Image (cartoon, helix red, strand yellow):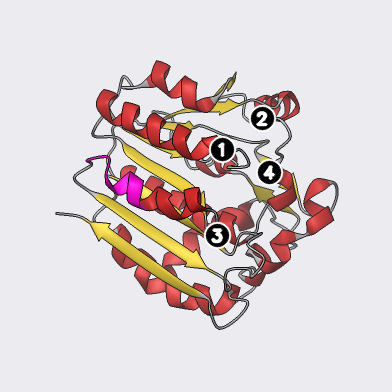
Amino acid sequence: MLSYRHAYHAGNHADVLKHWVLQLLLEYLQRKDKGLWYIDSHSGAGRYDLHQGMAAQNAEFASGIARLWQRKDLPEALASYRDAISALNPDGTLKYYPGSPLLAANQLRPQDKAQLFELHPRDVEQLSRLLPQAKVTQQDGFAGLKSLLPPPPRRALVLIDPPYEDKRDYQHVRNALADSLRRFATGTYAVWYPLLTRREAQELPRQLQQLGASKWLDVQLQISAAPSDGFGMYGSGMFVINPPWTLKEQLESALPWLVKTLGEDTAAAYRVNAQLD
């Protein structure tokens, strides 16, 4: 939806989970020298100034990345994620936060390729300037996936990350992922989703489990109790198809610390479900 701008939410608790998992996935896939494609269905602008404009209005980063920024007791599994944020802020002041395209692009090797989709014209323009080496397409990412799969190197990480402001996005996610698996069953797919009281959000993880993938992992980070009025996001999840065998252990080693750091009340918790055999 063109009304949605991720800048308002840059660096919040959901970004922490999403980008941490993304970083771990890329690190594992790059253990092999063979090139891979990074495909982002809803890319956004790529980089956000946390102290002016949209990101500063809600300052959601204050209860997200800012709580990790100068901690000395950061778990090892989270270190490379924070290092990636630090690289954008070399003077030690947390000013810029990367969107998933920039986070990934900064880690890609010469043999890798980034394919980025975004609908909002301003974000497309900014993303194209920021990442001239990437292929940026102004198109609905759900439709764009069909033209790219299977990728020539037969190796890819696909991030599916819509805003979910339109409840039809839940169905779009299921359909796009089902179609992608038919085209390219061995790819690694990461789907971000919000924790909401909305029925569609509650049912999405179970529906993704039923797509038939032999290996999957579902991680949720809940930062507070569900709102009594039914409005608002109280956490988020990442559903990964064909996850690295190392991912579950890495997540579980750091999630208790992350719950304590980002949690807002006693309902804060995490959950990891997986089918890995």
Viewport quadrant of the C terminus: bottom left
Question: Which residue bears the numbered disc 3?
Answer: 197
In reply to whether residue 141 is colored magenta, the answer given is no
The local crowd at label 3, few if under 14, some if 14 to 19, many if 20 or more residues have their Cα within 10 Å, is: some
Residue at image x 61%, y 38%? 166
**From the viewer's perspective, is the residue at label 2 or at label 3 nearer?**
3
Distance between the alpha carbons at the discs numbered 1 and 2: 8 Å
Question: 262 or 211, which lies in front?
Answer: 211
Q: Position of residue 262 (x, y in %)?
A: 59, 72
Q: What numbered label is drawn on residue 101? A: 1
Dot 1: within a 10 Å radius of its alpha carbon, few (fewer than 14), some, or many (20 or more) residues?
Answer: many
Considering only order in the chain, which callout, 4 or 2, is on the residue closer to the N terminus? 4
* Residues at discs 1 and 2 in contact (Cβ within 8 Å): yes
Q: Is residue 249 left or right of residue 226?
A: left
- Residue at which label 4 appears: 6
Q: Earlier in the sequence, mark 1 or mark 2?
A: 1
- Upstream in the sequence, badge 2 or badge 3? 2
In the figure, residue 251 lies in which quadrant? bottom left
Question: x, y (%) of residue 242?
Answer: 27, 45
Q: Which residues are magenta?
A: 206-212
The disc at residue 127 is 2
Residue 42 against residue 99 in the figure, above or below: above
Q: Magenta span has 211?
A: yes
Q: Earlier in the sequence, mark 3 or mark 1?
A: 1
Real-space CA distance between mark 3 and mark 1, rounded to the nearest whole angstrom: 29 Å
Disc 2 residue type (three-letter)? Leu
